[in-house]
Image: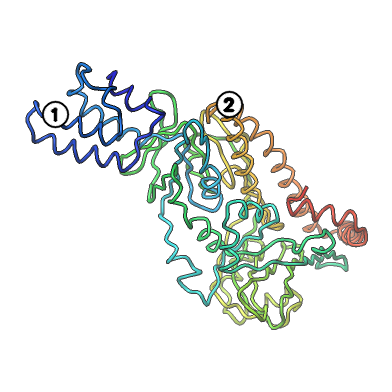
């Protein structure tokens, strides 16, 4: 064992890579058919594959019997990681790429990204049906776009399909109050970009497996989270295989299985609303503008889509009571188009639904703590909010930016990846901001749902005042864009 520990763990901080494990496996399997007297020769071949100087192991007692132990050690190392990120969505993959150079000195930390479904770009909506749009889109803020520029993928997104919007128009359905946010007022080329989720994912996965310290494991169907002999998270798959992590990051979405298995407490409630999502074609151009009408039953948003020179395609998010959502989903297409056109006050002329409709239940959820015992929550696993401001995924991107910053800083200070001080700093930086955004959205929801004369007057007066007071309007815009 002295030979094994010294040669594998201490020679220049060496890690056993996949090709070395394969070499060990081949030699080990071959050695099973040779006499015991030849096991030393087999071990010699393994050590040569590992580039371990002969002076380290030659003439050490018991080296021949170390053959199978060395093989088992190599295979164990392939299942042990410093950080395991569960969830191959946009937030999880962004974090994986941010951590691709984690702890480059004295040794790079080993990162694993696991997901229940392997991402196949050829099956993404963008490539499977290029003439149609992915119904799932994200309104990326400038902060999120800056993240993708840092990762070197924004150019890939731009080459595929995205629509920068230069203006946002918001108005009340029960009054004359309205506000217009414009990019030039905050000295920016745009207020953000509407991008299909499949476009973002395709760009994020491009070159992902070329990262030296990153292992992508999919499909990996999570069954349980246990503890290894050192108390670290052990992630068990349904097929019985397992991997271990010093730090497990739950980026597995709003219904996070890891959050449930680890018994994180949450505060949550149903809104009693569903969002109807689809793609529409409009008679008039969308003018690179994001439109949002607030009604007592919920907001209706028209988000401009790229890839159309005539600017006549939009993604809609229509929040209505659950009972009304059921009715709208059952309407024939022509009647649904008419109902949507009325709700939008025909701002863009006639409307035709160009894709199938999807219905998404709306629920607010927030974890009371973001970490415990070597497990940390990010993105929708930690918080979900009402989509009326389109901030959900942007909050998730801010989570991974901060967690990455704290992990890099912590390692430079000589701390371990699961050091409580690192995770506390992450929580202290992100939890107050997320709560602030959640309560702001909750306040907006109740304000625009109110139908009393006083409430209607108050919100219309407020919208008019904000629109007429440039400094306040620009401050709100800068905060929403992640510039503050």
Residue 230 at x, y percent in the picture = 41, 23
Q: Quadrant of residue 410?
A: top right
Disc number placed over residue 343 in the picture, else none: none
Left of 213 or right of it: where is 465? right
62 to 45, vertically: above or below: above
Q: Nearer the viewer, residue 123 or 82?
A: 82
Question: How many residues crowd mark 1 within 10 Å: few (<14), some (14–19), many (20+)?
Answer: many
- List the residue tagged with mark 2: 420
Q: Residue 458: in sight, yes or no?
A: yes
What residue is shown at x 43% (from left), y 66% (from top)?
123
Q: Are marks 2 and 1 in contact (CB under 8 Å)?
A: no
Q: Nearer the viewer, residue 55 or 175?
A: 55
Q: Residue 338: in sight, yes or no?
A: no
Q: Quadrant of residue 163?
A: bottom right
Residue 236 at x, y percent in the picture = 37, 38
Q: Nearer the viewer, residue 460 or 146?
A: 146
What residue is shown at x 46% (from left), y 47% (from top)?
211
Residue 135 at x, y percent in the picture = 56, 67
Render colour scheme = rainbow
Residue 95 at x, y percent in the picture = 55, 45
What residue is shown at x 38% (from left), y 41% (from top)?
223
Mark found first going from the N terminus, 2 or 1? 1
User: Quick one: quadrant of the N terminus?
Assistant: top left
40 to 381, vertically: above or below: above
Q: Quadrant of residue 75?
A: top left
Q: Secondary structure at mark 1?
A: helix
Q: Nearer the viewer, mark 2 or mark 1?
A: 1
State the residue lying farthest toward the top. Answer: 61
What residue is shown at x 65% (from left), y 48% (from top)?
395
Disc number placed over residue 39 in the picture, else none: 1
């Amino acid at each position: 064992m002295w030979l094994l520990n010294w040669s594998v763990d201490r020679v220049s901080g060496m890690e056993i890579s996949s090709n070395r494990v394969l070499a060990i496996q081949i030699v080990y399997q071959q050695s099973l058919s040779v006499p015991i007297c030849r096991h030393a020769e087999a071990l010699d071949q393994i050590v040569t594959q590992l580039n371990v100087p002969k002076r380290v192991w030659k003439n050490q007692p018991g080296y021949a019997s170390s053959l199978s132990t060395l093989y088992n050690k190599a295979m164990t190392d392939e299942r042990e990681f410093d950080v395991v990120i569960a969830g191959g969505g946009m937030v999880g993959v962004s974090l994986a790429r941010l951590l691709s150079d984690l702890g480059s000195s004295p040794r790079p930390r080993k990162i694993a990204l696991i997901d229940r479904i392997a991402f196949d770009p050829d099956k993404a909506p963008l490539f499977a049906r290029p003439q149609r749009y992915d119904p799932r889109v994200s309104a990326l803020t400038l902060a999120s776009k800056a993240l993708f520029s840092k990762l070197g993928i924004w150019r890939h997104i731009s080459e595929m399909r995205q629509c920068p919007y230069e203006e946002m128009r918001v108005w009340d359905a029960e009054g004359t109050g309205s506000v217009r946010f414009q990019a030039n007022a905050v000295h920016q080329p745009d207020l953000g970009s509407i991008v299909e989720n499949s476009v973002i994912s395709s760009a994020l996965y491009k070159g992902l497996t070329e990262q030296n310290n990153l292992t992508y494991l999919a499909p990996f169907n999570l069954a349980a989270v246990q503890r290894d002999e050192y108390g670290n998270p052990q992630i068990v798959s349904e097929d019985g295989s397992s991997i271990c992590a010093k730090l497990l990051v739950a980026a597995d979405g709003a219904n996070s299985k890891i959050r449930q298995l680890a018994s994180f407490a949450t505060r949550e409630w149903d809104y009693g609303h569903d969002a109807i999502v689809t793609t529409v074609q409009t008679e008039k151009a969308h003018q690179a503008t994001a439109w949002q009408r607030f009604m007592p039953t919920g907001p209706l948003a028209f988000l401009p889509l790229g890839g159309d020179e005539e600017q006549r395609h939009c993604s809609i998010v229509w929040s209505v009571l659950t009972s009304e959502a059921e009715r709208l989903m059952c309407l024939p297409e022509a009647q649904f188009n008419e109902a949507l056109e009325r709700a939008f006050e025909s701002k863009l002329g006639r409307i035709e639904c160009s894709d199938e409709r999807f219905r998404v239940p709306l629920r607010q959820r927030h974890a009371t703590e973001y970490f415990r015992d070597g497990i940390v929550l990010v993105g929708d696993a930690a918080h979900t909010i009402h989509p009326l401001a389109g901030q959900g995924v942007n909050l998730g991107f801010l989570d991974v930016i901060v967690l990455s910053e704290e992990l890099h800083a912590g390692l430079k200070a000589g701390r371990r990846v699961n050091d409580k001080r690192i995770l506390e700093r992450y929580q202290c930086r992100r939890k107050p901001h997320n709560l602030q955004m959640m309560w702001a959205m909750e306040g907006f929801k109740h304000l625009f749902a109110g139908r009393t004369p006083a409430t209607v007057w108050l919100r219309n007066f407020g919208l008019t005042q904000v629109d007429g007071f440039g400094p306040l309007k620009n401050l709100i815009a800068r905060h929403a864009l992640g510039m503050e």
